[in-house]
Image: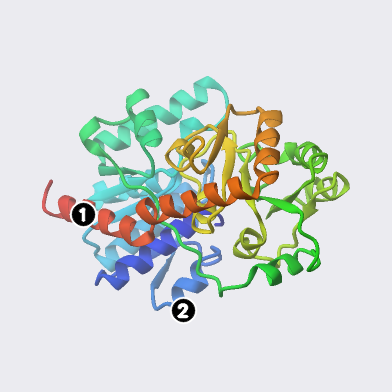
Amino acid sequence: MAGGVPAYVHDLTIGLRDRGWHVTVACDPMCEVADGLVQAGVRIAPFVASRTPSVHDARAFEQLAEVVRRERPDLIHAHSSKAGLLAGIAGRALRVPTIYTPHGWSFQMQGPSVLRAAFAATEGLLARQAHRRIVAVCASERADALRWLVARPDDVVVVHTGRTTADTPVGRSEARARLGLGPSDDRVVAAWIGRAGRQKGADGLPALARRLAETGVTLAVLGSGLEEAGIAAAVDASGGIAVRASISPHVLLTASDVLVSTSAWEGLPLVVLEALEHALPVVAYNVGGLPEQVFEGRNGHLVPAGAARALASHVAAIGRSPERMQRLGRASREIWSQRFRPEIMVERIELVYADVLAGG
């Protein structure tokens, strides 16, 4: 409904459309990118499914099967675990090849070992019996598929996510003013963008804001669920800034000097790609595909997951050296341009589609 997966689908859809593909997106009409796709002339087919296993999954499957019967697609590209499950079954039943992008494997999430093993077994069954290809967004995601015996090496291809911000350009002075920073306020701002919950590590933000404030760095946080969880107020009380929801990630990144990520697990997070495009150094926990985005000492730093003190120390060190900050930021922009532009992603996805349609 929100976050990286629908943003990815939006960007891929627009890119494919611009290259001559006819794309129908099956999604919940209340999904955050649905209106934008409709305005862009993309057909939306209603497909409502819960995030977790549910007694309503049979109804969701029927919805998807009806979409496939009506649209008669040449292939289906499913995004995220639930869609991968339902699309795999529908594609096999209706003889339409399916491609699957997990955007973070279901068995990677924190939980009981028995449940994770069950998820891995389900993913493996679908990979062997239904999906023609698995498109991993990073090498780490592919390695996990092989480690957990989910898929054969030839069936998993890595296509790095491409991302660019589509907001109306805004200057740095205006962006900082929207954060409540005056023209003479030259403090270093570290941005954090995510959502409340275990994956993004939001519970640790007040303590991080306090540590950074002691070094003269202001942590500015933006994300869903932070206010309801009491995290926003705690960040404000700890010397940080809880950014209003009316401010876009683009504005926050424009106003900031460095991005911090505290995720416990990830695929290839879009917020890091957006930070690279904005020429920001990145300091993050070393999880998932982060090593494919952040190169130690070149455009930022990676620290072990949970090492909040080390994270804060690197951010503070960057903040103390404008020259170093600019050098790391320039490298971030170069990495984005060379690896993560959306047109690169679309071209490589198109090659996967062509291979599958050719019977490969």
Depth order, front residue of 282/344: 282
Q: Can residue 360 be seen in this snapshot? A: yes
User: Residue 157 appears at what percent x and percent y?
Assistant: 27, 41
Q: Residue at x 84, y 47 (%)?
A: 239
Depth order, front residue of 104/317: 317
Q: Amino acid at mark 2?
A: Gln
Q: Residue at x 60, y 38 (%)?
A: 263
User: Residue 297 appears at what percent x and percent y?
Assistant: 51, 36
Q: Residue at x 56, y 23 (%)?
A: 112
The relative height of residue 235 versus residue 243 in the rendered view (above or below) is above
With 309 as the anchor, is 62 left or right in this view?
A: left
Q: Amino acid at mark 1?
A: Leu
Depth order, front residue of 261/111: 261
User: Residue 92 appears at what percent x and percent y?
Assistant: 25, 46
With 52 as the anchor, is 340 left or right in this view?
A: left
How far apart are the alpha carbons under marks 2 and 1? 27 Å
Q: Quadrant of residue 156?
A: top left
Q: Can residue 105 be seen in this snapshot? A: no
Work out which residue is located at the far top of the displayed protein and give it.
113
Please tell me whether mark 2 or mark 1 is closer to you in this view: 1
With 38 as the anchor, is 338 left or right in this view?
A: left
Q: Quadrant of residue 251?
A: bottom right
User: Secondary structure beneath disc 2?
Assistant: helix
The relative height of residue 62 versus residue 282 in the rendered view (above or below) is below
Mark 2 lies on residue? 39
Identify the mark at residue 271; answer none if there is no mark: none
Work out which residue is located at the far right of the displayed protein and give it.
237
Q: Are marks 2 and 1 in contact (CB under 8 Å)?
A: no
Q: Residue at x 72, y 52 (%)?
A: 188
Identify the mark at residue 351; answer none if there is no mark: 1
